[in-house]
Amino acid sequence: MTGHLGTQHPDARDRPLREDEGELPGYSDNKDAILNRLRRIEGQVRGLQRMVDSDQYCIDVLTQVSATTKALQAVAVELLDDHLGHCVQEAIAAGGDEAQDKVTEASQAIARLLRA
């Protein structure tokens, strides 16, 4: 799947986009809210750049880095919740190999978030 900035996650290379399958992603109901949160985070990152450019105190910059990190983590948890409540739930209801694949995929996503 191609991300917002044109990058592709390595695990997504061999999977077709859900939209190609005629399905919307699990976050589609919250898309506008997620985009608004990401735009705010983008503004926080630009603010961090300005702080460094203007030689702000290290601890102040670190405090803002922490706030930005927490904001990104909150978006990740929301996306994961949407994925579990939509994509994984539908796959389990359908049964078969896809159900186990979706559970494994979600577990791997959780593991990546915990490592971050």
Image (tube, helix red, strand yellow):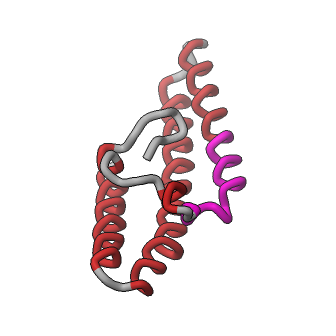
Say left or right for 25 vs 95. Answer: right
| Residue 115, percent from left and from top | 29, 52
Say left or right for 64 vs 40. Answer: left
Residue 96's place in the image compared with 84, above or below, is: below
Residue 98's place in the image compared with 8, above or below, is: below
Residue that protrudes farthest toward the front in the picture = 21
Over which residues does the magenta segment extend?
A: 24-40
Image point (70%, 55%), residue name: 33
Along the line of sight, the residue nearer the viewer: 4 or 59: 4
Corner quadrant of residue 39: top right
Image point (62%, 35%), residue name: 42
| Residue 107, percent from left and from top | 31, 67
| Residue 57, percent from left and from top | 53, 22
Corner quadrant of residue 45: top right
Along the line of sight, the residue nearer the viewer: 100 or 47: 100
Residue that protrudes farthest toward the top in the picture = 54
Queried whether the magenta region covers residue 33, the answer comes back as yes
Queried whether the magenta region covers residue 43, the answer comes back as no
Image point (30%, 44%), residue name: 10
In terms of secondary structure, what is the magenta stretch mainly? helix
Say left or right for 79 vs 92. Answer: right
Image point (35%, 62%), residue name: 110
| Residue 77, percent from left and from top | 49, 61
